[in-house]
Image: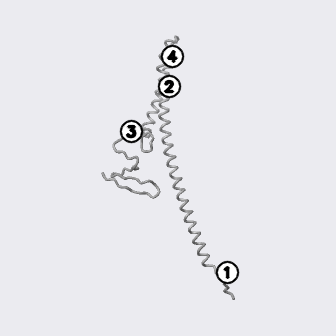
Amino acid sequence: MTVVSRENTRKAPVLSVEGGAAASPATSRQGIDDGVDQRGSLSWVSRPWLPVLGTALGGLGLMLLVVAYVKVSHESAVALQLPYIVSGGLGGLFALGAGAAVLLARELRLDNERLGDLDRKVSMLGEAVEDVLDDLARLTQRIDGQSRQAQPDSGSSEWA
């Protein structure tokens, strides 16, 4: 495996590994998958099956709550209601909360990616505006220099 270094004038150097994979020098670790990606966030949050898991957990939680309610409503003695409340009620609340947390984590990850893309685009736009302003300043200086060369000296009199 050969590593080729490419340098970008505005960004940190990027290492390119044969096969097209790219990684920054500080975060390139081969063969280690600890569930954390290069930006330090959890990599499992970007999995495509997460909405299905979150929805399934939420549905399971609602189902457990409904079953627990129905079972508790048919029992008159509090001692007989407690097992349904503990197993169905608390289990249902836990499953519902876990499903909501999974869905929320995925949405937050997507929002972070969108904000990162937006930040990069705004930075690129700022750099482009700076380049245009620099070009405009050079053009203005060149025009001023040409107009000064074209004007005759006020001390010499061509009409005399």
Q: CA distance from mark 3 to mark 2?
A: 30 Å
Q: CA distance from mark 1 to mark 3?
A: 78 Å
Residue type, mark 1 in image: Ser
The residue sitting at 44% across, 42% down in the picture is 40
Q: Which mark is residue 72?
A: 4
Q: Is residue 60 left or right of residue 130?
A: left
The residue sitting at 47% across, 34% down in the picture is 102
Q: CA distance from mark 1 to mark 4?
A: 104 Å
The residue sitting at 43% across, 57% down in the picture is 8
Residue type, mark 3 in image: Asp
For disc 1, the marked residue is 154
Q: Residues within 10 Å of mark 2 (few under 14, many from 20)?
A: some
Using the image as rendered, state which of residue 69 and residue 91 is in the foreground.
91
For disc 2, the marked residue is 93
Mark 3 element type: loop
**Mark 1 touching mark 3, by CB under 8 A?**
no
